[in-house]
Image: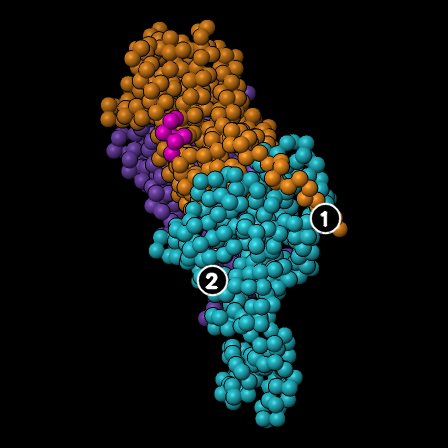
Amino acid sequence: MSTPLISARGLTKKFGDFTAVNGIDFDVYKGESFGFLGPNGAGKSTAMRIIGATSQRTSGTISILGKDPEINGPQIRAHLGVVPQQDNLDMQLSVTENLYIYGRYFGLPRKFVKQKVEELLAFAQLEEKRDAKVENLSGGMKRRLTIARALVSEPEILMLDEPTTGLDPQARHILWDRLFRLKEQGVTLLITTHFMDEAEQLCDRLIVMDKGSIMAEGSPATLIKDYSSKEVLELRFGSDRNQAVADQLRSMCERIEELPDRVLMYTEDGEELLERVYAANLHPKTSLVRRSSLEDVFLRLTGRTLIE
Amino acid sequence: MAVAIADARAGKRGERVYSGRVLQLLERGYIAFKSSTYMIVISGFLEPVLYLLSFGYGIGKLLPTIAVGGETIKYAAFIAPALLATSAMNGAIYDSTMNVFFKLNHDRIYHGMLATSMGPLDVALGEIGWALIRGFSYACAFMVVIAPLGLVVSAWGLLAIPAAVLIAFGFASCGMAVTSYMKSFQQLEIVNMILLPMFLFSGSFYPITVFPQWLQFVVNLLPLSHAIDLVRGLCLGHINFGLAGHALYFVVMIVVGLFFTTKRLNALFMK
Amino acid sequence: MSIINIRQGSLVLVDAAKVQSRGAIYVAQARIRQMMKWIWMILGIAIANPVLYLISVGIGLGGLIDKSVGSAGVDGVKYLTFLAPALLAQAAIQGTMDETVFPTLEGFKWHKTFYSMNSTPLTGTQISYGVFLTALFRAFYTVVLYFIVMWLFGAVNSPRAWLAIPTAIFAGASFGALMQALAGRLEDENIFFVVLGRFVMMPLFMFSGTFFPLTSMPFFLQWIGWISPLWHATELGRHLTYGHEVSPTMVWVHFIFLGIMLVAGLFFSARIFTKRLAK
Ligand SMILES: Nc1ncnc2c1ncn2[C@@H]1O[C@H](COP(=O)(O)OP(=O)(O)O)[C@@H](O)[C@H]1O
Ligand SMILES: [Mg+2]
C-alpha cells in the first residue's frame, strides 16, 4: 500500500481537564473518502481542526502530506480546502468577493482566481447572487458558498465538517452528488457527520467516534457486517408495553435493543421473524423490516443512538 | 388570576395597545439590571463628573467666570447644569436606541412579551420607565456631587431633578420611536452622528449668544438646548415663563414619541 | 448542473512561500475592501468631526478664553491653535481604535472570519499585522484630512507643522496596537465597550491636556496624561505646529514611550491572535 496522506497516532486534545479527543489512530490514503461518524460532542470537529493545522494537539503525533502541522502549518494548509461546521463567511463582502479574497489568501495569481470564481459560482449555483451581500443569503446558499470557497485553491484534500447539517433533503442530495464528482476527480475527502445515511453514501472508509475515542473502523459495509445482522425488525407496542414484551422478544432472535419508543430486533430474515412474533400472539402497533445501517452499528457499540 | 389581570382593562379605551402591565416590565428591567455589571451602571454616573472635573477645573483656570443674564458666575457653575441635562439625554438615548434595537432585532424579546396579553404601549412605557428610573438616580447622584461644591446657586435647583427626568422621558420616547423604525445597525450610527453636533452647539460650554443670529436660531430648535436652558435656569434661580416653554417642548416630545412608538410596534407585532 | 475542474491542483499553483512573505498585505487588502463599503461615511465623519470641534470649542469657547487670558494667550497662542494639534492626535487614536477593535471582534467572535483566514496558509501573526496595517491606513487619511481642515482654520503656524501628521499617526498606531491585543482576548464585548468608552477613552480625552495645559490639572490627576499616548503625541504636535516648548530630553521620552507601546502592542497582539486561533 502507498504511504498515507494523513497519519495519526495517539492523537489527543484536551481543553483544560476535559479530553475532547482521546488518543486516536487513523490513516487516510490518497483519493479515498474518509469519514468521522459520531454524535454531537464526539470530538469530530476538534479532530478536524487539528488535521486542518489550525488547532494545536495536546499529545500524540500526526503527519499531513508528510509534514507536522506544528512546524509546517502554512505549508500544509496551502493544500487543504476547509469547510468548517459553522460558516465563517465575510458577511460584509459580496459572494464573488468572498471567493476572490479567499483565493488571494493562498497567494494565487489574480487572473487564475478570477477565472476560478466564475467556475465556482456555477458549481454552487450562485451565479444570480454573485453581487449579493453574503448577509442576505439563505442558509443553504451560505453553505454552498462555503464549500465553493474551500475549492478555490483546488485543494488536494477537501475537509468537510458536517457539510449538510441544517440543509433540506433536496439540497443534501445535490451536495452529495457534487462531492461524489470531486472524489471522481481524485480529490481526497474528509467528512464528519452524525447522519448515518450521509456516511453510508459518501464514505469509502470511516471511523466511528464516541466521547473522543474510536469505537470501530472500516468500510460502511464491513462495519455493518461485523457489528450488526443483515436485517432489523422495528416494532412499536406503545411506550408502556415495549418493556413488558421485551423479555419475550429477546428469546426469539440473536439480539434486541430497547429504545424508549420502539424495540429493534436483529435477525437475518426480518419477515420470517415478524411472522413468529405474530404467532407468539404479540401484536405490535406498527412494524418495519429494514436493512441494518450504521445507526445499528453505533447502537451496538455504545448502547446509544447517534441523534439524541 | 392571570385572566383577571388581563381582563382588568377589557372594554376600556385603548385596551388593544395598553393592558396596564408596565410594572411587570419594570420588574423584568430590574431583574436584567441586577444581572448586568456594576461597571455599566457606575460609568453612566461617572461621565458628567469627569466632564465637570476636566472642564470645570481645567477650562475654569483659563476662563474663571462667565456672564449669563447680566450675572457673573463661576465657569463650573455654568457647565454643571448643562452636564446634568446632557447626561439625562445620553442615558435615555442609550437605553432607548442601542438597547431597544438589540431587543427588537436580535434577542426578539418583544415578540415574546407581545405574545402575552401585553400591548405595545406597555412595552414602550416599561422600557422608557426603566430609562427614567436610571435617569432619576443619576440626576440625584450628580446633584449630591455638585451641590456641596456650591455649583447650585438657588434652591430652585432641587427642581432640576424632576426636570432631568422629564428630559430623559422626552428623549427616551423619541429615541424609541426612531429606533423602532430602524432596520440596520448602521442606521443607529446616524443617531450618534446627530448627537455630537447637538452636544457641541447647544450651549453646554458657553452661552450660544457668541454665535451669529442664524446659528442661534437653529440651535434654539434643538431639544438639547431647551434641556440645558431648563436645568440651568433652575440651578441658577433664573425663574421665568421661558422655563415653562422649555418644559412644554419635552411634553410634546413625550406625546409624539409615544404615539409613534405604539403605532410602529402595533404595525410590527399586532398584524 | 456544472461541476468544477480540479486541473492543476493546489500542488502547482499555491505558493506558500509567497504567502509567508506577503500574508499581512493580503489580509489588509481584504480589510480595505470592506472599509471601502463605508468609505463615504468614514470620510464624512473624518471631516465633520474636526470642523465641528474646531468651530464649537476652538472658536466658540476659544473666543471667550482668548478674551479672558488676554495677550498672554494659552501657552502663548490663540486657543484654537493650542487645541488643534491635540484633536489631530485624538483623530488618529480614534481612527485606529475603530479599525482594530471592531475588526478583531468580528474576526474572532461575530463572524469568525479570522478562523477562515487561518484555514489558508495565513498565520495568526499575519492576520494581526494585516488588521493593524489597515488601521494605519485609516489613521493616515483621517489625519491628513484633519490637518487640511486645521490649516484652513488658520491653526497651522510653522513650516514644519506637517510633521505633526506622522507623530499623530504614531500615537494612533501605538494605542491601536495595544487595543488590538486587548480586543484579541475579549470574550464579553458588551461590558468592554462601556468600560473602554467611559473609563478609558473619555478620561484620556479629558485629562491628556487636550483642552487645557496638563500642568493646570491638580498634580494627582496629571499621571493620566503621562500614561496617555494622546498627551505624548499632543506635546509633540504642539511643539511642531506652533513651537510649544519641549526639551530635547522630553522629545525622546515621548517617542520612546509611544515606541514601547507600539512594539509591545504588536508583539502581544500577534501572540494573542496566534494562541486564540490555535486553541
Ligand atoms: N474550544 C473549546 N473549549 C472547550 N471545550 C471544547 C472546545 N471545543 C470543543 N470542546 C468540547 O469538546 C467536545 C468535542 O467537541 P467537538 O469536537 O465539537 O465535537 P463534535 O464535532 O463531534 O460534535 C465537546 O464536549 C465540546 O464541548
Ligand atoms: Mg462538530
Name the residue nearer the viewer: C198 or B143.
C198
**Which segment is the magenta one?**
C262-268
Q: Identify the image quadrant of residue C72.
A: top left
- Residue identified by numbered label 1: C3
Query: Pointer 2 indicates a residue of which chain?
Result: A
- Residue type marked 1: Ile
Asked if residue C9 can be seen in this view, the reply is yes
Percent across and percent down for residue A287 are 63, 82
Chain letter, purple: B
Task: Assess disc 1: are there few (<14), some (14-19) or many (≥20) residues with their C-alpha within 10 Å of its C-alpha.
Answer: some
The residue lying furthest to the left in this view is: C220
For this view, does A209 lie left or right of residue A290? left
| Mark toward the viewer: 1 or 2 | 2
Camera-side residue of C237 and A284: A284
Inspect the magenta stretch and tell me whether residue C187 lies in it. Answer: no
Residue C254 located left or right of residue B6 = left
Give the x, y percent position of residue C53: 46, 22
The disc label shown at residue A214, or none: 2
Q: Secondary structure at mark 2?
A: strand
Query: Which lettered chain is shown in orange?
Result: C
In the image, residue C267 lies in the stretch drawn in magenta: yes
Residue type pointed to by label 2: Ile
Pointer 1 with pointer 2, Cβ within 8 A: no
Instruction: Identify the secondary structure beneath mark 1.
Output: loop
Vertical placement of A7 versus C233: above or below? below
| Pointers 1 and 2 within a single chain | no
Residue B61 at x, y = what percent? 30, 18
Q: Which chain comes out cyan in the rendered image? A: A
